[in-house]
Image (cartoon, helix red, strand yellow):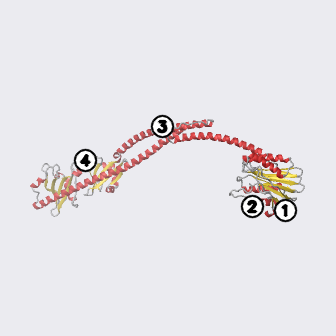
Amino acid sequence: MNSSIKRKIMLLLSITSLLSSSVFLIYSINVFEKDKIAYIYDTNSIYLETITNQFKNELKLSSEISKKYLTEYQKNKAFSSGDSIFLDEDSFVKGLFLVDITNPASPQLVDKITVKSNFGYKLTEDVGFLKSVPQTLAESKSMFLGGELVYVSDVVYDASEKIALVTVFRSDALQSFFETDKAFSSFMMSMSGDVVRQTSNLQAGYLKEEFPTLFTRLDSIKMGTSEIKSAQQEDWLLSSSSLGLNDLYLVTLTNKKEAFGVLTYLINKSLIVFLMVLSGVVLVSQFASTYVTKQILTLSEAAKQIIGGNFKINVPVKGNDEISLLSETFNKMAVEMVKLLEDTAQGARLEAELKTAQAVQQTLFPPVHQKFENGEIHGSYQSASECGGDWWHYFENEQKIWFWMADATGHGAPAALITSAIKSAVAMTENLKMEPEVAIELVNKSICQVSKSKMMMTCFLGVIDKATRVVHYVNASHEAPFILSKRTDLKKKDLRFLDNSKCNRLGQSMTSEFKVASEQLEAGDRIFVYTDGIPDIRNKNEESLQERGMFKVVLENHNKGVNVSQFITGVHAQFETYRENTELIDDVTFFAVDVL
């Protein structure tokens, strides 16, 4: 268990670190890549815009100089020799050439003016250039490139004389654009697909060989920024800007892989940092898992000792975290278990004693059914707890049938002790020929001596004279029994209550007096005797049966014309149906005596 938890903690921390670092790395690379592409595009776009704007300014300046010299020529039909003073080694314009294009097939150089030193580019020797001049007159401006340096010719002509003025100047902008020490390759292209100029370190035809797709969709040059594939399927970043002349564009191509070399560096460094972090996490998780599992192992060993019967275990509490709280709770649990076991043992002893008392109390009750010479009795008893406070009894001698019903205060073991006392006292009177009031006085004195007036009980004593069928009774504050005649259509108003004797409860006073009352019975009469537990019977809705419900049940079963045993059984069944297996509030005891 210990190593398994350690592995789980280490695996959890490692996977969490791996996932979080990987997500961060992927996110960072993606953001960096997008930012890098945007940076390259922005940088190249700004650079190209700067170059083209600089070239346009150069072109504008050359046009102004050309117009000045053309005006001079038109006045004098020749360049003034003094004009060359403006053309020195540092001059922007390197030379001006007048070309007669009267015969377009054979243009002739008319005049020229150049820098004072030997001008390296000899226009008269460039037959191809001279021949191209008439072809470009349809446009106000045309550009040509010659030699190692970049030259631009501004063609301005007088249509009447068929003379063209060609201004040659060195473009610093284009010279800078085609330098080789850049992170990108430079090209000048026309929309017809001609590569006019490229970086000098590239071979002729490089662009067409390496990027054939560019020539199948030349319009992509006008997009400004885009991505294209090389012949080797490598990704390149393309930026372009219009030169504003002859439908020419300046184009840069940047190798994406080389541009993102720093990204590879970033990934390598990130992996190194990630491995370092992961190693740290593994070490931390090792210490953390060892601490956690050590405490859990200690608790496990302590639990084994408790299982083995050692409940006096105490786990050391270290720290102030959840594991320490668990250890502290475990120690409290061990203490509570000791108390619980002691209470359980005590409870078991009490339960055993209560079962013994219950078994003993059962011996205090007579058989539930008995036939006499002139009568028959049947009873029912249910205790609300292990031991009850209700008690009933009967016996018969030569002339009389005696029956008792008593209900001690409360229920449980204390009440059961009082029932034991009354049973002993009544047993003493069975073999003595005495009147009911004398018998109950004797029982009262016995109860008073046992309970010391701390516990009392209600009681009803009835004595039936077999010869005369007169019942003599004493009621010591008990519920009044009632007589049901032999008829089977009885109602509550037909009941005769034995309530003419009202005396103190047994155990209330040693000097209590008990009055005897009498009632004449007829053959077929039935006496119903009960305790106050019957009206207190409740159903699941906490509704009590009450006396009204009791009378209804008793009358329904009596009017069936059944014998006493069937009558008591029927009454008991209806009480149980109403109760719906809920707990009893008080002991429930009742019996009936049929007079024959």
| Residue holding disc 3 | 287
Give the alpha-carbon distance from disc 2 to disc 3, as whole Å: 77 Å
Q: Which one is in front, 88 or 331?
A: 331
Q: Which image quarter holds the C terminus?
A: bottom right
Q: Disc 2 on helix, strand or loop?
A: helix
Q: Position of residue 292 (x, y in %)?
A: 51, 39
Q: CA distance from mark 4 to mark 1?
A: 136 Å
Residue 195 visible here: no
| 2 or 4: tag closer to the N-terminus | 4
When the figure is inspected, residue 347 is found, relative to residue 164, above or below; the finding is above
Pick whichever of labels 2 and 3 is earlier in the sequence: 3
Q: Kindly identify which residue carries mark 4.
A: 179
Total marks drawn? Answer: 4
Q: Are marks 2 and 3 in contact (CB under 8 Å)?
A: no
What is the three-letter code of the residue carrying label 4?
Glu
Q: Residues within 10 Å of mark 2 (few under 14, many from 20)?
A: few
Instruction: Name the residue type under label 1.
Output: Arg
Residue at 38% in and 49% down:
31
Q: Amino acid at mark 2?
A: Arg
Q: Tag 4's secondary structure? A: loop
Residue 584 position (above or below residue 290): below
Residue nearest the observer in this picture, 220 or 520: 520
What distance separates the C-alpha of mark 2 from that of mark 4?
120 Å
User: Residue 146, how many percent across, how many down?
Assistant: 21, 51
Q: CA distance from mark 3 to mark 4?
A: 61 Å
Q: Nearer the viewer, mark 4 or mark 1?
A: 1
Mark closer to the observer (2, 3): 2
Amino acid type, label 3: Phe
User: Where does the image place residue 96, in percent across and percent down from the top left?
Assistant: 15, 55
Q: Which residue is mark 1?
A: 487
- Label whose residue precedes the other's in the sequence (3 or 4): 4
Q: Which residue is mark 2?
A: 548
